[in-house]
Image (spheres, grey):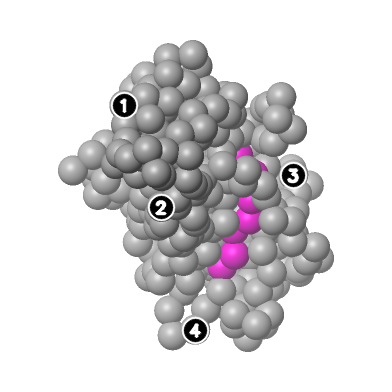
Amino acid sequence: MNIFQKIATSLCLVAFALTATAEDTPWYQVEVLVFANEDPSVLDDEFWPQGLDVNHQRNAIRLRPPLHNSNSTFDAYELLPTSSLLFNDEKKRIARYHSYRVLYHAGWLQPVEKQKKARPIHIRAGQILDNGMYELEGYITVDRGRYLHFKPDLYHSRKLSNSESNLLRDFLNAGDQPLTSSTENSQSTSSVATEDSGLSTVTPLSTSFLNVPEFLTINMKQGRRMRSEEVHYLDHPLMGVLVLMLPVKTTGSTER
Protein backbone atom coordinates (compact mmCIF):
# COMPACT_ATOMS: atom_id res chain seq x y z
CA MET A 1 0.00 0.00 0.00
CA ASN A 2 1.56 3.35 -1.03
CA ILE A 3 1.31 6.65 0.83
CA PHE A 4 -1.65 7.79 -1.29
CA GLN A 5 -3.70 4.77 -0.29
CA LYS A 6 -2.65 5.11 3.36
CA ILE A 7 -3.90 8.70 3.36
CA ALA A 8 -7.25 7.70 1.90
CA THR A 9 -7.81 4.80 4.26
CA SER A 10 -6.66 6.58 7.42
CA LEU A 11 -9.17 9.40 7.26
CA CYS A 12 -11.83 9.62 9.91
CA LEU A 13 -14.38 12.16 8.77
CA VAL A 14 -17.41 13.78 10.34
CA ALA A 15 -20.05 15.21 7.98
CA PHE A 16 -21.48 18.63 8.73
CA ALA A 17 -24.44 20.56 7.33
CA LEU A 18 -24.29 23.62 5.08
CA THR A 19 -27.11 25.49 3.40
CA ALA A 20 -28.15 25.15 -0.23
CA THR A 21 -31.18 25.65 -2.45
CA ALA A 22 -34.56 24.25 -1.58
CA GLU A 23 -35.24 22.34 -4.79
CA ASP A 24 -35.48 18.74 -5.97
CA THR A 25 -31.92 18.51 -7.31
CA PRO A 26 -29.69 17.24 -4.48
CA TRP A 27 -26.77 19.38 -3.39
CA TYR A 28 -23.36 18.24 -2.22
CA GLN A 29 -20.24 19.69 -0.76
CA VAL A 30 -17.40 18.54 -3.00
CA GLU A 31 -13.81 18.57 -1.78
CA VAL A 32 -10.87 17.69 -4.04
CA LEU A 33 -7.17 17.35 -3.27
CA VAL A 34 -4.80 16.75 -6.21
CA PHE A 35 -1.14 15.90 -5.63
CA ALA A 36 1.80 15.04 -7.85
CA ASN A 37 4.30 12.21 -7.48
CA GLU A 38 7.66 13.72 -8.48
CA ASP A 39 9.77 10.63 -7.82
CA PRO A 40 11.93 10.25 -10.97
CA SER A 41 12.01 6.46 -10.61
CA VAL A 42 8.38 6.14 -11.76
CA LEU A 43 9.11 7.78 -15.11
CA ASP A 44 10.42 4.58 -16.65
CA ASP A 45 7.37 2.52 -15.69
CA GLU A 46 5.70 3.02 -19.07
CA PHE A 47 5.73 4.97 -22.33
CA TRP A 48 4.23 8.44 -21.87
CA PRO A 49 2.19 10.02 -24.68
CA GLN A 50 3.53 13.22 -26.21
CA GLY A 51 1.76 16.31 -27.48
CA LEU A 52 -1.14 16.23 -25.03
CA ASP A 53 -3.16 19.41 -24.77
CA VAL A 54 -6.22 20.39 -22.77
CA ASN A 55 -9.46 19.77 -24.63
CA HIS A 56 -11.32 22.96 -23.73
CA GLN A 57 -15.03 22.68 -22.96
CA ARG A 58 -17.12 25.76 -23.65
CA ASN A 59 -19.93 25.00 -21.22
CA ALA A 60 -17.61 24.72 -18.22
CA ILE A 61 -18.18 26.54 -14.94
CA ARG A 62 -15.47 28.43 -13.06
CA LEU A 63 -15.41 28.36 -9.29
CA ARG A 64 -15.75 31.80 -7.67
CA PRO A 65 -14.06 33.28 -4.60
CA PRO A 66 -16.41 33.51 -1.60
CA LEU A 67 -18.51 36.66 -1.43
CA HIS A 68 -19.80 36.18 2.11
CA ASN A 69 -18.18 37.39 5.30
CA SER A 70 -19.98 34.65 7.21
CA ASN A 71 -19.41 30.91 6.91
CA SER A 72 -23.10 30.18 7.34
CA THR A 73 -24.30 30.21 3.72
CA PHE A 74 -22.62 29.72 0.36
CA ASP A 75 -23.88 29.78 -3.18
CA ALA A 76 -23.28 27.19 -5.87
CA TYR A 77 -19.74 26.94 -7.23
CA GLU A 78 -18.40 29.35 -4.63
CA LEU A 79 -15.12 28.31 -3.05
CA LEU A 80 -15.40 27.38 0.60
CA PRO A 81 -12.98 28.84 3.17
CA THR A 82 -9.93 26.75 3.95
CA SER A 83 -11.05 26.41 7.56
CA SER A 84 -14.11 24.37 6.50
CA LEU A 85 -12.17 21.85 4.41
CA LEU A 86 -11.62 18.34 5.74
CA PHE A 87 -8.41 17.37 3.91
CA ASN A 88 -6.23 19.99 5.63
CA ASP A 89 -4.40 17.39 7.73
CA GLU A 90 -3.85 15.21 4.67
CA LYS A 91 -2.43 18.22 2.82
CA LYS A 92 0.11 18.75 5.61
CA ARG A 93 0.96 15.06 5.64
CA ILE A 94 1.66 15.00 1.91
CA ALA A 95 3.91 18.06 2.24
CA ARG A 96 6.22 16.10 4.56
CA TYR A 97 7.22 13.78 1.71
CA HIS A 98 9.79 15.35 -0.59
CA SER A 99 8.59 13.38 -3.65
CA TYR A 100 4.96 14.50 -3.36
CA ARG A 101 3.54 17.97 -3.92
CA VAL A 102 0.01 19.28 -3.56
CA LEU A 103 -1.20 20.84 -6.80
CA TYR A 104 -4.75 21.75 -5.85
CA HIS A 105 -7.03 21.74 -2.82
CA ALA A 106 -10.51 23.26 -2.82
CA GLY A 107 -14.10 22.68 -1.80
CA TRP A 108 -17.40 24.02 -3.04
CA LEU A 109 -21.16 23.42 -3.04
CA GLN A 110 -23.07 22.40 -6.13
CA PRO A 111 -26.33 20.83 -7.29
CA VAL A 112 -25.64 17.40 -8.76
CA GLU A 113 -27.64 16.87 -11.92
CA LYS A 114 -28.29 13.82 -14.07
CA GLN A 115 -25.56 13.12 -16.62
CA LYS A 116 -27.24 14.93 -19.53
CA LYS A 117 -27.55 18.18 -17.55
CA ALA A 118 -24.23 18.08 -15.71
CA ARG A 119 -21.66 20.78 -16.52
CA PRO A 120 -17.90 20.40 -16.02
CA ILE A 121 -15.98 22.62 -13.63
CA HIS A 122 -12.83 24.23 -15.00
CA ILE A 123 -9.77 23.71 -12.77
CA ARG A 124 -6.49 25.63 -13.01
CA ALA A 125 -3.67 25.57 -10.47
CA GLY A 126 0.04 26.15 -10.12
CA GLN A 127 2.35 28.17 -12.30
CA ILE A 128 2.14 28.71 -16.05
CA LEU A 129 5.09 26.82 -17.51
CA ASP A 130 7.16 27.80 -20.53
CA ASN A 131 5.14 25.40 -22.65
CA GLY A 132 2.07 27.59 -22.03
CA MET A 133 0.29 25.08 -19.79
CA TYR A 134 -0.56 25.34 -16.12
CA GLU A 135 0.94 22.76 -13.81
CA LEU A 136 -2.61 21.49 -13.39
CA GLU A 137 -5.50 22.21 -15.71
CA GLY A 138 -8.61 20.43 -16.84
CA TYR A 139 -12.16 19.64 -15.78
CA ILE A 140 -14.10 17.88 -13.07
CA THR A 141 -17.67 16.73 -13.70
CA VAL A 142 -19.98 15.42 -10.99
CA ASP A 143 -23.28 13.82 -11.96
CA ARG A 144 -25.66 11.22 -10.62
CA GLY A 145 -27.62 8.18 -11.66
CA ARG A 146 -28.13 5.37 -9.24
CA TYR A 147 -24.83 6.47 -7.70
CA LEU A 148 -22.78 9.64 -7.67
CA HIS A 149 -20.19 9.86 -10.43
CA PHE A 150 -16.93 11.82 -10.23
CA LYS A 151 -15.27 12.34 -13.62
CA PRO A 152 -11.90 14.11 -13.73
CA ASP A 153 -10.22 15.08 -16.99
CA LEU A 154 -7.07 16.63 -15.56
CA TYR A 155 -3.71 17.46 -17.18
CA HIS A 156 -0.55 17.71 -15.11
CA SER A 157 2.43 19.30 -16.83
CA ARG A 158 5.97 19.41 -15.45
CA LYS A 159 9.40 20.39 -16.68
CA LEU A 160 11.84 17.51 -16.79
CA SER A 161 15.25 17.86 -15.21
CA ASN A 162 18.33 16.75 -17.13
CA SER A 163 18.53 13.54 -15.13
CA GLU A 164 14.84 12.80 -15.77
CA SER A 165 15.29 13.42 -19.49
CA ASN A 166 18.24 11.03 -19.56
CA LEU A 167 16.23 8.43 -17.66
CA LEU A 168 13.40 8.62 -20.16
CA ARG A 169 15.79 8.55 -23.09
CA ASP A 170 17.47 5.40 -21.79
CA PHE A 171 14.09 3.78 -21.20
CA LEU A 172 12.85 4.61 -24.70
CA ASN A 173 16.08 3.40 -26.23
CA ALA A 174 15.92 0.12 -24.33
CA GLY A 175 12.31 -0.41 -25.29
CA ASP A 176 13.12 0.24 -28.93
CA GLN A 177 15.75 -2.51 -29.28
CA PRO A 178 13.36 -5.46 -29.87
CA LEU A 179 11.69 -3.49 -32.63
CA THR A 180 14.96 -2.80 -34.49
CA SER A 181 16.85 -6.07 -34.13
CA SER A 182 17.43 -6.53 -37.87
CA THR A 183 18.82 -4.31 -40.59
CA GLU A 184 15.64 -4.69 -42.61
CA ASN A 185 13.48 -2.93 -40.05
CA SER A 186 16.12 -0.73 -38.43
CA GLN A 187 14.57 2.45 -39.80
CA SER A 188 10.96 1.38 -39.56
CA THR A 189 8.44 2.95 -37.23
CA SER A 190 6.34 0.77 -34.96
CA SER A 191 3.82 1.63 -32.30
CA VAL A 192 2.88 0.54 -28.82
CA ALA A 193 -0.60 0.94 -27.38
CA THR A 194 -0.75 2.05 -23.76
CA GLU A 195 -3.68 2.43 -21.43
CA ASP A 196 -3.11 5.16 -18.85
CA SER A 197 -5.89 5.87 -16.29
CA GLY A 198 -8.67 5.11 -18.73
CA LEU A 199 -7.09 6.94 -21.69
CA SER A 200 -5.72 4.79 -24.49
CA THR A 201 -3.01 6.29 -26.68
CA VAL A 202 -0.65 5.08 -29.37
CA THR A 203 2.96 6.26 -29.11
CA PRO A 204 5.31 5.91 -32.11
CA LEU A 205 8.59 4.11 -31.45
CA SER A 206 11.57 4.10 -33.80
CA THR A 207 15.34 4.42 -33.71
CA SER A 208 14.87 8.17 -34.12
CA PHE A 209 12.42 8.39 -31.18
CA LEU A 210 15.09 9.51 -28.73
CA ASN A 211 14.27 13.21 -28.47
CA VAL A 212 12.73 13.52 -25.03
CA PRO A 213 10.55 16.62 -24.68
CA GLU A 214 11.50 19.36 -22.22
CA PHE A 215 8.04 19.10 -20.64
CA LEU A 216 6.00 16.04 -19.77
CA THR A 217 2.21 16.28 -19.73
CA ILE A 218 0.04 13.48 -18.45
CA ASN A 219 -3.74 13.10 -18.40
CA MET A 220 -5.93 11.58 -15.70
CA LYS A 221 -9.30 10.73 -17.18
CA GLN A 222 -11.18 8.09 -15.24
CA GLY A 223 -14.76 8.09 -14.10
CA ARG A 224 -15.46 6.78 -10.63
CA ARG A 225 -18.74 5.68 -9.11
CA MET A 226 -18.93 6.98 -5.54
CA ARG A 227 -20.89 6.95 -2.35
CA SER A 228 -21.36 10.14 -0.40
CA GLU A 229 -19.59 10.62 2.92
CA GLU A 230 -16.79 8.26 1.86
CA VAL A 231 -13.26 9.26 0.90
CA HIS A 232 -12.27 8.06 -2.56
CA TYR A 233 -8.79 7.83 -4.02
CA LEU A 234 -8.00 7.98 -7.75
CA ASP A 235 -4.57 6.72 -8.69
CA HIS A 236 -2.09 7.54 -11.46
CA PRO A 237 1.67 6.83 -11.49
CA LEU A 238 2.44 10.57 -11.48
CA MET A 239 -0.51 12.02 -9.58
CA GLY A 240 -3.34 11.18 -7.24
CA VAL A 241 -6.72 12.63 -6.26
CA LEU A 242 -8.61 12.47 -2.98
CA VAL A 243 -12.35 13.18 -3.23
CA LEU A 244 -15.11 13.57 -0.68
CA MET A 245 -18.75 14.45 -1.35
CA LEU A 246 -21.11 15.28 1.50
CA PRO A 247 -24.87 15.72 1.15
CA VAL A 248 -26.01 19.24 2.02
CA LYS A 249 -29.21 20.36 3.71
CA THR A 250 -31.53 22.40 1.48
CA THR A 251 -32.64 25.40 3.50
CA GLY A 252 -32.94 28.35 1.22
CA SER A 253 -29.84 29.81 -0.39
CA THR A 254 -29.96 30.49 -4.13
CA GLU A 255 -27.89 29.28 -7.03
CA ARG A 256 -26.55 32.01 -9.28
The kind of secondary structure element at disc 3 is loop
* Front-most of residues 193 and 144: 193
In this view of the protein, can residue 129 be seen by the observer?
yes
Residue depth check, mark 4 versus mark 2: number of the one nearer the observer = 2
Question: Of callouts 4 and 1, which one flags the residue occurring earlier in the amino acid sequence?
Answer: 1
Question: Of callouts 1 and 3, which one flags the residue occurring earlier in the amino acid sequence?
Answer: 1
Tell me which corner region of the image, top left, top right, bottom left or bottom right, holds residue 168: top left
Separation of marks 3 and 4 at Cα, in angstroms: 29 Å
Who's the residue at 39% across and 44% down the image?
A: 184
| Residue bearing the label numbered 1 | 41
Question: Of callouts 2 and 1, which one flags the residue occurring earlier in the amino acid sequence?
Answer: 1
Q: Are marks 4 and 2 in contact (CB under 8 Å)?
A: no
The kind of secondary structure element at disc 2 is strand
Separation of marks 3 and 2 at Cα, in angstroms: 44 Å
Query: Please, what is the dominant secondary structure of the magenta stretch?
Result: strand
Separation of marks 4 and 2 at Cα, in angstroms: 36 Å
Q: Which numbered dot is residue 192?
A: 2
Question: Of callouts 3 and 2, which one flags the residue occurring earlier in the amino acid sequence?
Answer: 3
Separation of marks 2 and 1 at Cα, in angstroms: 21 Å
Give the farthest residue toward the top: 162
Which segment is the magenta one?
Answer: 136-142
Give the farthest residue toward the front: 184
